[in-house]
Image (cartoon, grey):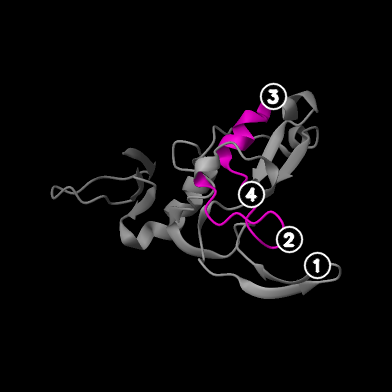
């Protein structure tokens, strides 16, 4: 189990965390404690997932930012390809965090200096009916990461906490 503590403050004699928020990652589940600080801890955890340092805006202006839809980028672990339908324009295509990590050197060679990834929380299990010109009708799923069902769990199709 991984644990990250955010904030500052004192713990009471009963061991209750006061002024702090804990993020625990246990078997692919993200647990936030105490309950009333869950949202703040989740927002902090999203920013703390990767080593980051604050930079003035002028320095960011020189960065080359690349946005990655994980499911559409690279499949590094075929074992997590449940329900993959590459012929479905709105379906899961199999990309995952391992695939992204395997391509980091190539991205660096292209001059990419910063990555922005889609949300990785567990997605709704069912899709929505959709249609598009040239594609006909299809089932549109949460491959993009924005149809979150459980904010405390990772989408298994993207990988696990160790991959993140």
In the depicted view, which residue is nearer to us: 93 or 114? 93
Which image quarter is the N terminus in? top left
* Label 4: which secondary element: helix
How many neighbours does mark 3 have within 10 angstroms: few (below 14), some (14-19), or many (20 or more)?
Answer: few
- Which of 41/74 is in front? 74
Which stretch appears magenta?
80-104
> Disc 4 and disc 3: Cα gap in Å?
19 Å
- How far across and how far down the image is residue 137, in percent? 74, 74
Q: Which mark is first along the chain, 1 or 2? A: 2
> What's the mark number on residue 135?
1
Q: Disc 2 to disc 4, how far (Cα)?
A: 12 Å
Residue 54 showing in the rendered view: no
CA neighbours of label 1 inside 10 A, class few (<14), some (14 to 19), many (20+): few
According to the picture, the residue beneath numbered tag 3 turns out to be 105
Instruction: Name the residue carrying label 2.
Output: 89
Q: Which mark is residue 149?
A: none
Among the 4 quarters of the image, the one containing residue 4: top left
Labelled pair 2, 1 in contact (Cβ < 8 Å):
yes
Dot 3 falls on a residue whose secondary structure is helix
Q: Secondary structure at mark 1?
A: loop
Q: Residue at x 70, y 61 (%)?
A: 88
Q: N-terminal of the two: label 4 or label 3?
A: 4
Task: Say if 76 sits above or below 70 in the image.
Answer: above
First reached walking from the N terminus: tag 1 or tag 3: 3
The quadrant where residue 75 appears = top right
Marking on residue 71: 4
Cβ atoms at labels 2 and 4 below 8 Å apart: no
- Please give the name of the residue rendered at 13% of the width and 50% of the height, measured from the top-left corner: 14
Of callouts 2 and 4, the N-terminal one: 4
């Amino acid at each position: 189990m991984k644990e990250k503590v955010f904030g500052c403050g004192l713990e009471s004699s009963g061991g209750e965390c006061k002024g702090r928020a804990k993020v625990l990652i246990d078997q692919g589940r993200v647990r936030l404690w105490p309950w009333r600080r869950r949202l703040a801890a989740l927002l902090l955890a999203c920013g703390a997932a990767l080593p980051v340092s604050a930079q003035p805006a002028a320095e960011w202006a020189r960065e080359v930012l690349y946005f990655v839809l994980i499911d559409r980028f690279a499949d590094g672990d075929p074992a997590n390809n449940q329900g993959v339908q590459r012929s479905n324009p709105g379906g899961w295509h199999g990309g995952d965090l391992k695939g992204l990590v395997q391509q980091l050197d190539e991205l660096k060679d292209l001059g990419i200096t910063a990555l922005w990834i889609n949300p990785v929380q567990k997605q709704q299990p069912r899709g929505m009916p959709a249609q598009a010109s040239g594609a006909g009708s299809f089932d549109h799923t949460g491959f993009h990461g924005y149809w979150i069902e459980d904010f405390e769990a990772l989408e298994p199709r993207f990988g696990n906490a160790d991959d993140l």
